[in-house]
Amino acid sequence: MQKHIFCVTKNLAKGANKYLSRRKWLYICLTAICTITLIFTVPQLVAQPPQRFVAVTFDDLPVITDRNDDGVKLDTTNKLLASITKNKIPTIGFVNENQLFDDVTGQLNASELNLLRAWLKNGVELGNHTYSHINLNESGLAAYEADVVKGEIITKRLLKDYGKKMRYFRHPHLHTGRDQKTKQGLEKILEAHGYIVAPVTIFLEDWKFNPAYDQAFLHGNKAMMSKIGQAYLSYVEQELDYWERQSVKLFKREIKQVILFHSTTINADYFGAIAEKLKKRGYKFITIDEALRDEAYKSKDNYVGDGVSWLHRWALTQGKNFVLDSRPQVPYFVGAYNLDTSGQ
Ligand SMILES: [Zn+2]
């Protein structure tokens, strides 16, 4: 009997030890789970992107493409506008009115006009990008002014139909003058015509990808289209990183940026993915008005020369050491493919 009681007690003690041991394991397991959760959560919290702001702009409206076909232009416009509206992106598009006229007959092309109406219908503001995408470095101021005035006639009428006014001007090639006299002369001309200059801080060379992308399409080379598209996405990511760092170098903070895209077939296919990239980096989409309220845009700019980002203009005005080197490059194969296939 005593032996039996001893055995029961021993078994109870064993059970208790077992119980304690289970509790101990439970404790160890919970501690491990908490530690693992912390290891994976804390860096994510720390790695949250900063709050960033960007105004999206498109140049060379209605559409600039080597696939010169009304259907392609309509498809390009619809795809761009679908990505813009899906992501609720306040946008401004800059028009070259010479695109609205038939090359042969000189008649106003109704389908090109309808493309501009589609941008307006979707809430996009339109601005002037000159009539013929004139090059200031070759034209001189008088011819340039005439091209600015010629380039606003139809767009102003369309804007009025949508209760809007022409407000912004974007320089073709971002050329603002190779000398101070031209630069200051043009500033006065634009002011006299009531324009606000639309600067660019995130300066993409997206236009270099599109001719190759169009050539790949025309050759039925889907694999090359995809290769160019993927290279473009990776290039955009590198440029975003570069211009964010350039802003911090110059202003010790990330300013409200203005980004430039072109109304092209490659952007029709990839702008949606780029919008997602921007959101992942913490960007909120704002109007160009809101971006320009950032004090940075009051920075002194006495830069003269070829077209560059305003971040570089301000940096160069303050001294060359403010300009970051190693700006991302468009991959060599993109330009090479275009030259190989376009017969140039
Ligand atoms: Zn342009």
Image (spheres, rainbow, N blue to C red):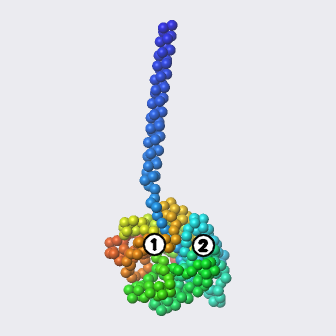
Circle 1 crowding by C-alpha within 10 Å: few under 14, some 14–19, many from 20:
few
Which residue sits at x=38%, y=79%?
301
Whether residue 342 is visible to the viewer of this picture, yes or no, is: no
The residue carrying mark 1 is 293
Q: Residue furthest bottom?
A: 142
Secondary structure beneath label 2:
loop
Whether residue 3 is visible to the viewer of this picture, yes or no, is: yes
Secondary structure beneath label 1:
loop
Residue 123 numbered mark, or none: 2
Of 291 and 47, nearer the camera is 291
For residue 272, above or below residue 183: above
Contact (Cβ within 8 Å) of mark 1 with mark 2: no
Mark 2 residue type: Gly
- Number of marks drawn: 2
Mark 1 residue type: Arg
Q: Earlier in the sequence, mark 1 or mark 2?
A: 2
- Ligand 1 under 8 Å from disc 2 Cβ: no
Of 62 and 156, nearer the camera is 156
- Ligand 1 under 8 Å from disc 1 Cβ: no
Of 342 and 154, nearer the camera is 154
Q: Position of residue 140 (x, y in %)?
A: 45, 90
